[in-house]
Amino acid sequence: MTVDKILKKYSDELETLVFDHFTSETALAIGQSIIDTARNNKYKIAVDISRFNHQLFHYSFDGTTPDKDLWIYRKKNVTLHFYTSSIYMAYKLKHDNTTLTEKYGLSNEKYSATGGAVPIVVKNIGVIGAITITGLTPEQDHDLVVSAIRNYLKDLE
């Protein structure tokens, strides 16, 4: 798949991941879903769900290290800065043959355009936070977040 098609896929995907509202209970349900999936697959991940810079949910599996929290911080910063998924920005930078530092002046210490952070988008409001996973490949991190959001939204139907 070309980078252009990948960018379109990730852009279109975000349009389907919209909440009517997002509460602490929503974060708990999605966080628990992610943990259950990770346990079933023996993934060693860390997950964070934050709304307006307020951490609503955080869990790190045994066997993870504190650097996972730094990865969460950096991925989440990309999503909150650009209002899109961190994997979308990774491919956008690849497409443009540039980096966050070169194009936007953002430091690698605070930002990382790699998959795993997905914006929390609420209808008629916009981006209010991010759900972030780290510990797998960038694509797996991203897909695990997207799957948990889709399952949650589907259960509401």
Image: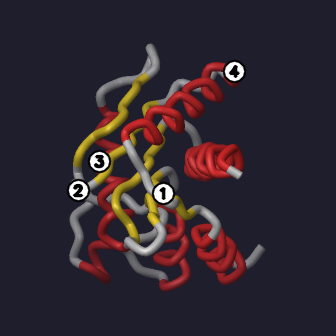
Callout 2–callout 3 Cβ contact below 8 Å: yes
Closer to the chain start, of discs 2 and 4, is 4
Q: Residue at x 31, y 51 (%)?
A: 51
Q: Is residue 105 visible?
A: yes
- Read off the residue under disc 2: 110
> The disc labelled 3 sits on which kind of residue?
Tyr
Residue 53 place in picture, x, y as percent: 23, 51
> The disc labelled 1 sits on which kind of residue?
Val
Q: Residue at x 53, y 38 (%)?
A: 30
Residue 130 place in picture, x, y as percent: 39, 54
**CA–CA distance in space, label 2 to label 4:** 32 Å
> The disc labelled 4 sits on which kind of residue?
Asn
Residue situated in front as seen by the camera: 23 or 88:
23
**CA–CA distance in space, label 4 to label 3:** 26 Å
**CA–CA distance in space, label 2 to label 3:** 7 Å
Closer to the chain start, of discs 2 and 1, is 2
**CA–CA distance in space, label 3 to label 1:** 13 Å
Q: Residues within 10 Å of mark 4 (few under 14, many from 20)?
A: few
- Read off the residue under disc 4: 40
Closer to the chain start, of discs 4 and 1, is 4
- Read off the residue under disc 1: 118
Q: Residue at x 27, y 73 (%)?
A: 101
**CA–CA distance in space, label 2 to label 1:** 17 Å
> The disc labelled 2 sits on which kind of residue?
Lys
Q: Nearer the viewer, mark 2 or mark 1?
A: 1
Which label number is shown at residue 73?
3
Q: Nearer the viewer, mark 2 or mark 3?
A: 3
Closer to the chain start, of discs 3 and 1, is 3
Q: Residue at x 31, y 33 (%)?
A: 67
